[in-house]
Image (spheres, helix red, strand yellow):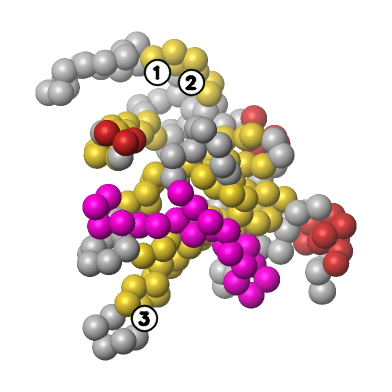
């Protein structure tokens, strides 16, 4: 889920590395293009590190080939997963864009991005296996942010573990493909369970 928080879009996501849990690795995040060409760092948007009392996930910023990258540790004791609450999407100032070689005014209108996730996994032979995945395209404009799902009321605040009850969520800007995410956190805000449900129709 993405929601608008001026002057940047805040990212809220869950990331987990499957099939490897021998040693800690760093999850790298950066902002990429969303057009039909090959995926590359976006020229007009970059990842933004968020800090504060409400942020539970550790992170650090690094620069790789002039691209700002956010690194988040994935630890075996956390099932190689991280609840990402420390990142946002920041638009560069026009003056900074103009300083970049080869950029044009047309490029400034490119407001669609993808959040890119990358890990480098050490192999027994001394080589490194790099894995990369990208989100669906995200529209980085205030208009699209205002059209994001807004929850006004939920009919349940709790239920039995066995389930079987119906929850009705009312609000605005719900779409057929909208999903409700349920997160359970244990001691130290460690994520212990997730589930999702596709809503049945537009309220």
Percent position of residue 167, x then y = 30, 17
Mark 1–mark 3 Cα distance, whole angstroms, equals 46 Å
- Residue 73 on the magenta segment: yes
Residue visible at 37% across and 31% down? 180
Percent position of residue 34, x then y = 60, 59
Percent position of residue 131, x then y = 39, 70
The residue to which callout 3 is attached is: 128
Q: Which of label 1 and label 3 is nearer to you? A: 3
Mark 2–mark 3 Cα distance, whole angstroms, equals 43 Å
The residue to which callout 1 is attached is: 169
Quarter of the image with the C terminus in it: top left
CB within 8 Å, label 1 to label 2: yes
User: In the structure shown, which secondary structural element does the residue marked by tag 2 occupy?
Assistant: strand
- Region of the chain picked out in magenta, as a range: 58-79
Mark 3 Cα within 10 Å, few/some/many (few <14, many 20+)? few
Q: Is residue 78 above or below residue 29?
A: above
Residue visible at 71% across and 64% down? 43
Q: Does residue 11 show up? A: yes
Residue visible at 24% across and 39% down? 192
Drawn side of residue 106 relative to residue 155, left or right: right
Q: Residue 151 — which label? A: 2
């Amino acid at each position: 889920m993405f929601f608008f928080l001026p002057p940047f879009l805040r990212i809220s996501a869950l990331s987990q590395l499957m099939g490897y849990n021998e040693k800690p690795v760093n999850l790298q995040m950066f902002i990429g293009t969303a057009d039909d060409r090959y995926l590359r760092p976006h020229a007009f948007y970059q990842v933004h590190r968020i800090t504060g009392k409400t942020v539970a996930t550790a992170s650090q910023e690094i620069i790789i080939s002039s691209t700002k990258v956010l690194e988040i540790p994935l630890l075996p004791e956390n099932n190689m997963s991280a609840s990402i609450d420390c990142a946002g999407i920041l638009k560069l100032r026009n003056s900074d864009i103009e300083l970049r070689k080869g950029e044009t005014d047309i490029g400034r209108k490119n407001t669609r991005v993808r959040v890119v996730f990358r890990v480098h996994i050490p192999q027994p032979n001394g080589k490194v296996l790099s894995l990369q995945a990208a989100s669906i395209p995200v529209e980085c404009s205030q208009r699209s942010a205002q059209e994001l799902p807004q929850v006004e009321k939920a009919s349940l605040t709790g239920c039995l573990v066995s389930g079987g009850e119906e929850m009705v969520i009312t609000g605005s800007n719900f779409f057929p493909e909208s999903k409700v995410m349920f997160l359970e956190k244990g001691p130290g805000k460690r994520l212990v369970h997730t589930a999702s449900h596709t809503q049945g129709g537009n309220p």
